[in-house]
Image (tube, rainbow, N blue to C red):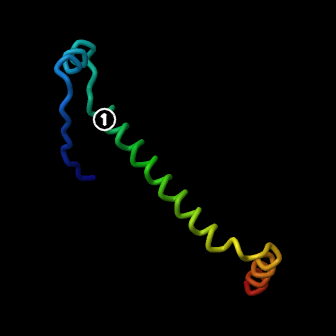
Amino acid sequence: MQYVTVSAKIPRKLKKLLDKYRIKPGPIIRRALENEVKKKMLEQIENEVKEFTKKVSHISDEEIVRLIREDRERR
């Protein structure tokens, strides 16, 4: 896996506290960014599901059942 460097400016006081408590910011930042990306991905999927639901909402339950049965019979 290849890595890139991402930097952020933080208040000097926060940096001193990180040093005082020997907290390495790298893993914390990495985890926060991963969580934010997951959150955005879920939001995008939810929006896509809503759009899909709007597009297929006109199809009746009976029609869906019929299509599923037809598909199963073809297998």
Q: Position of residue 39 (x, y in %)?
A: 46, 47
Please tell me which residue is depicted at 38% across the width and 44% down the height of the picture.
34
In this rendering, the count of numbered labels is: 1
Quadrant in which the C terminus is drawn: bottom right
Left or right: 61 in relation to 29: right
Q: Position of residue 57 (x, y in %)?
A: 69, 71
Q: Quadrant of residue 68?
A: bottom right
- In the structure shown, which secondary structural element does the residue marked by tag 1 occupy? helix
Q: Position of residue 59 (x, y in %)?
A: 73, 76
Left or right: 33 in relation to 46: left
Crowd band around label 1 with a 10 angstrom C-alpha radius: few (<14), some (14–19), many (20+):
some
Q: Quadrant of residue 64?
A: bottom right
Q: Position of residue 48 (x, y in %)?
A: 53, 64
Instruction: State the residue in front, 19 or 40.
Output: 40
Please tell me which residue is depicted at 55% across the width and 57% down the height of the picture.
46
Q: Looking at the picture, does residue 19 appear above or below residue 4?
A: above
Please tell me which residue is depicted at 37% across the width and 37% down the height of the picture.
32
Please give the residue where the numbered disc 1 appears in the rendered image.
29
Instruction: State the residue in front, 48 or 38.
Output: 48
Type of amino acid under label 1: Ile
Left or right: 48 in relation to 32: right
Q: Looking at the picture, does residue 75 appear above or below residue 11?
A: below
